Image (spheres, helix red, strand yellow):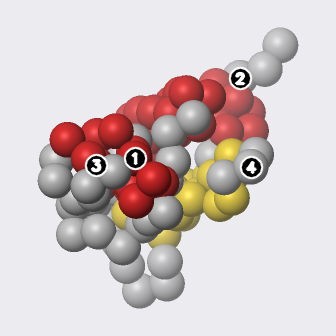
Amino acid sequence: MSTPGNVQAERYQLFQRTGSTRWQVRFSIKGQGQFKRSLDTDDEREAERRAEAIWYEATYRAKQGLIPIGGDYNRYAHWRSPRDMMIQGCATSLFQASQH
């Protein structure tokens, strides 16, 4: 029987960068590469809660075929689908949106 800690270790890793009290999360999704995100908290329990939510959302979106988009000012923008980008005015066509 596995413990919750073992399940977490299979999904993602929590870590703190040297000199920082903020928690970070790191995980990989097949076909998508590695994700690293700041969890914007010093509290380990809260970091675990946020990491779990981010991991679940990322794996769900990967299964739905939503493309990751980086380098946007919006911290959630990397999860936009091409259709959402078109609706939000970031692209004028689905082809253009899929090129980001």
Crowd tier of the residue under label 3, counting other residues whose Cα lies within 10 Å: few below 14, some 14–19, many 20 or above: many
Q: Is residue 50 visible?
A: no
Q: Earlier in the sequence, mark 3 or mark 2?
A: 2
Left/right placement of residue 13 relative to residue 72 reads right
Give the mark, 3 or 1, whose residue is nearer the N terminus. 3
* Amino acid on which the number 1 mark rests in the picture: Leu
In whole angstroms, how far apart are the C-alphas of marks 4 and 1?
21 Å
Asked if 1 appears above or below 57 in the picture, the reply is above
Three-letter code, disc 4? Gly
Residue under pointer 4: 31
Disc nearer the start of the sequence (2/4): 2
Find disc 1 in the rendering and name its residue: 94
Under circle 4, the secondary element is: loop
In this orientation, which residue lies closer to the viewer: 98 or 2?
Answer: 98
> Do callouts 3 and 1 mark residues in contact (Cβ within 8 Å)?
no
Which element type, helix, strand or loop, lies under badge 1? helix
Tell me the CA gap for discs 3 and 1. 8 Å
**Kind of residue at badge 3:** Met
Q: Distance between the residues labelled 3 and 2?
A: 40 Å
Q: Residue at x 69, y 58 (%)?
A: 33
Q: Residue at x 49, y 63 (%)?
A: 99
- For label 3, the residue is 85
Q: Are marks 1 and 2 in contact (CB under 8 Å)?
A: no
Judging depth in this view, the residue of 12 and 16 nearest the camera is 12
Q: Which of marks 3 and 4 is nearer the N terminus?
A: 4
Instruction: Name the residue located 69 percent from the left edge and 46 percent from the top edge.
Output: 29
Q: How far apart are marks 3 and 4 (CA)?
A: 22 Å
Q: Nearer the viewer, mark 3 or mark 2?
A: 3
User: Element type at marker 3?
Assistant: helix
For mark 2, what is the residue? 3
Q: In this view, does 1 lie above or below 15?
A: above
